[in-house]
């Protein structure tokens, strides 16, 4: 293997690296996955869960394109919840609680069953560069392995430093050493680098907890699943999570250790994720709150290890232990290991193209936390896109990108490379201006044709998607074509406190009312008969309901997207000289020179570039 020239080498086997390696190999590229420990492929370093607000949409998109995260989330799930179900469908977000050990095992078995994929365990300490082009990697043993493209997915391992109270030591994750050499080489090549921080809570022995004092949080009564494929099935049994709270007593005990906290005594200078703060940060920032929620999450079907979500901390272990023992239900708690914070190197993502290829070095791609993101889902989606483009580059084919109106993945990558980030970036539905179009239920309709063209989604998957699309369209047309008489619909309307009708009308109009659901209209004989005659499943029924009830919003958002998309087709020449535009603000010129946007639309999203600057740019481009 050392004498081979690989099409793609992927460095790191976390969520980003696993998706990158799978994508490249499945596209026919000879791929090598290099990691420091093959026993820790796709390790869930933090909480044992996939999905959540906006993150669940990303997992569905990965699955629709032909990635593996959705499949593994289903096969290793111990609980399923559709979050935000009380809100509109643009906000619905699937989430699973995972069996941590099974998750990693299922990922490894999937990768080992993937053709064109080799594995090697060792630390990559440097890159082989020739004339601003990557040609391979160098390992800590001095072994050189050649490749046409390289994907770096180093996670928190680049010069990782773990903090527990006044103690700190090198490491990329608890019990694993840090990776060295790559940051220093990239900085020497002209890259900017920075430091970020993240943290994780203590893991405890579930046998030492009193769940009777906590609030049980079961999964959905009728659980769904992530993958659109038939090979995975919804859960028949589920494990419950539980909820408890901190208290003023707990907060006082935690404050006793603040002088030994690396967050407050200045030893940690890097920024952590604002939307997932440590418990000491929450107490400090929200001093008016007398309690905070803690979610007690089992780590698998059979293990007694438990994750204390909401108690992320870098406080000394004795302070952590003393404070947790004052939490209701934790009076006799036993630790598996304390929580810790970790600092690591990242590279500001404005140094990347939309393909996640670096601007400085041809054939070199970054994905995951190396780009300043946080979260398994954000990392996995970047890994998928980097793996796709590294493979296409090696095969000398056109690159593949997603626009903001096509996928949350498109929003994520565009935000990173256009705006950059100075704190760990996390996806939210509010970041997507077209979230009514980018729902979790239609990710297959949006992306499976693209996955099929890439060679990632199978023909069977494509046909299943087309069948769903056609069935839903016909069902929507049925509502548009079918009339209902007052004597049949009025009893249903009356029960729902909806205005009665005095003449026959189309079902579409009745169904469009906000207080009328699919369960209501199924009481109309012709509707239930149509469903039975056409063997419609729940996916099709749900899709049709959304299309009917939100048709106005969807049409309006499509129209807005079409208007703004026009600027996506106004390309900016690669060698465009912004310094010649004297009537543009100095800040805009500097930002445009640094980021080098490829389209006017991208230029308009750069912080500090005003609409007036864009108008001036268009004039100079002869538009």
Image (cartoon, rainbow, N blue to C red):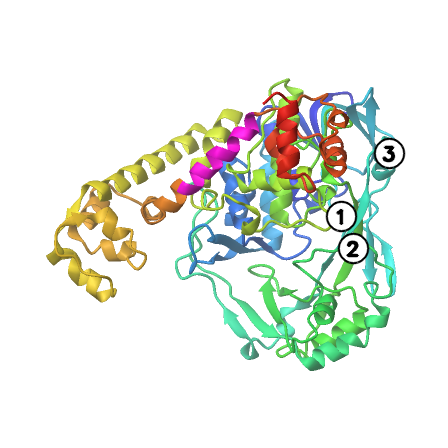
Where residue 561 appears, x then y in whole percent?
48, 37
Furthest-bottom residue in view? 249
Circle 3 packing at 10 Å, graded few (<14), some (14-19), many (20+), is some
94 w.r.t. 403: above or below: below
Distance from Cα at disc 1 to Cα at disc 2: 8 Å
Residue 64 placed where, x, y %? 49, 37
Q: Are marks 1 and 2 in contact (CB under 8 Å)?
A: yes
Image vertical order of residue 564 relative to residue 149, above or below:
below
Q: Is residue 580 left or right of residue 550?
A: right
Q: Is residue 71 left or right of residue 516?
A: right
Please name the residue that numbered disc 2 is placed on.
342
Front-lying residue, 98 or 548: 548
| Number of numbered discs overlaid on the protein picture | 3
Q: Residue at x 20, y 42 (%)?
A: 533
**Residue 185 - label:** 3
From what the image shows, is residue 386 above or below residue 256? above
Residue 447 seen in the current view = no
Query: Of 37 and 90, which appears nearest the observer?
Result: 90
Q: Is residue 194 visible?
A: yes
313 or 290, which lies in front?
290
Label number found at residue 236: none
Tag on residue 156?
Answer: 1
Q: Position of residue 552 (x, y in %)?
A: 36, 45
- Dot 2 crowding, Cα within 10 Å, few <14, some 14–19, many 20+: many
Q: Is residue 330 magenta?
A: no
Residue at 16%, 52% (x, y): give it: 525
What range is drawn magenta here? 556-569
Label 3, label 2: how far apart the Cα atoms are: 22 Å
In this view, the residue farthest toward the top is 396
Element under label 3? helix
């Amino acid at each position: 293997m050392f004498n081979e020239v690989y099409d793609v080498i992927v460095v790191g086997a976390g969520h980003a690296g696993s998706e990158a390696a799978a994508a490249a190999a499945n596209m026919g590229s000879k791929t090598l996955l290099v990691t420091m420990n093959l026993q820790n492929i796709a390790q869930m370093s933090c909480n044992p869960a996939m999905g959540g607000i906006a993150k669940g949409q990303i997992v569905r998109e990965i699955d629709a394109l032909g990635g593996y995260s959705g499949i593994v989330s289903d096969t290793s799930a111990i609980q399923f919840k559709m979050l935000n179900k009380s809100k509109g469908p643009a906000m619905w977000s699937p989430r699973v609680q995972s069996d941590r050990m099974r998750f990693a095992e299922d990922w490894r078995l999937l990768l080992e069953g993937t053709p064109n994929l080799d594995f090697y365990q060792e630390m990559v300490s440097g890159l082989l560069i020739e004339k601003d082009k990557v040609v391979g990697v160098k390992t800590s043993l001095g072994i050189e392995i050649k490749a046409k493209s390289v994907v770096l997915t180093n996670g928190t391992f680049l010069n990782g430093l773990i903090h527990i109270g006044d103690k700190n030591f090198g490491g990329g994750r608890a019990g694993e050493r840090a990776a060295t050499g790559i940051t220093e080489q990239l900085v020497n090549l002209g890259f900017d680098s920075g430091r970020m921080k993240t943290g994780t809570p203590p893991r405890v022995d579930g046998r030492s907890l009193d769940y009777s004092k906590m609030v049980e949080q079961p999964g959905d009564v009728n659980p769904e699943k992530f993958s659109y494929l038939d090979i995975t099935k919804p859960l028949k049994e589920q494990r419950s999570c539980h909820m408890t709270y901190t208290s003023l007593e707990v907060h006082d005990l935690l404050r006793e250790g603040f002088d030994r906290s690396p967050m407050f005594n200045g030893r940690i200078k890097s920024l952590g994720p604002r939307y997932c703060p440590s418990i000491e940060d929450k107490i400090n920032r929200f001093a008016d709150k007398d309690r905070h929620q803690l979610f007690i999450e089992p780590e698998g079907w059979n293990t007694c290890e438990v994750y204390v979500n909401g108690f992320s901390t870098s406080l000394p272990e004795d302070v952590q232990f003393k404070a947790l023992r004052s939490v209701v239900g934790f009076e006799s708690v036993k630790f598996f290991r304390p929580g810790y914070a970790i600092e690591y190197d990242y590279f500001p993502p404005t140094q990347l193209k939309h393909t996640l290829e670096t601007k400085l070095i041809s054939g070199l791609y970054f994905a995951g936390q190396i780009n300043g993101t946080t979260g398994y889902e954000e990392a996995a989606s970047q890994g998928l896109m980097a793996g796709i483009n590294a493979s296409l580059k090696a095969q000398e084919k056109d690159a593949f990108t997603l626009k903001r109106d096509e996928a949350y993945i498109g929003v994520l990558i565009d935000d990173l490379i256009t705006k950059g980030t100075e704190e760990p970036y996390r996806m939210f539905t509010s970041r997507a201006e077209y979230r009514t179009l980018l729902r979790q239920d239609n990710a297959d309709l949006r992306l499976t044709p693209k996955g099929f063209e890439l060679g990632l989604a199978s023909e069977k998957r494509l046909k299943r998607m087309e069948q769903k699309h056609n069935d839903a369209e016909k069902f929507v047309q049925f509502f548009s074509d079918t009339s209902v008489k007052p004597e049949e619909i009025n009893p249903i309307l009356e029960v729902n406190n909806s205005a009665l009708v005095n003449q026959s009308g189309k079902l579409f109009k009745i169904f469009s009312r906000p207080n009328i659901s699919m369960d209501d209209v199924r009481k109309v004989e012709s509707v239930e008969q149509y469903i039975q005659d056409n063997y419609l499943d729940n996916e099709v029924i749900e899709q049709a309901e959304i299309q009917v009830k939100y048709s106005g919003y969807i049409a309006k958002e499509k129209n807005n997207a079409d208007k703004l998309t026009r600027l996506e087709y106004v390309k900016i020449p690669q060698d465009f000289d912004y310094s010649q535009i004297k009537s543009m603000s100095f800040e805009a010129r500097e930002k445009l020179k640094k980021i080098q946007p490829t389209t006017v639309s991208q230029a308009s999203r750069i912080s500090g570039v005003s609409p007036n600057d864009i108008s001036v740019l268009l004039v100079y481009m002869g538009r």
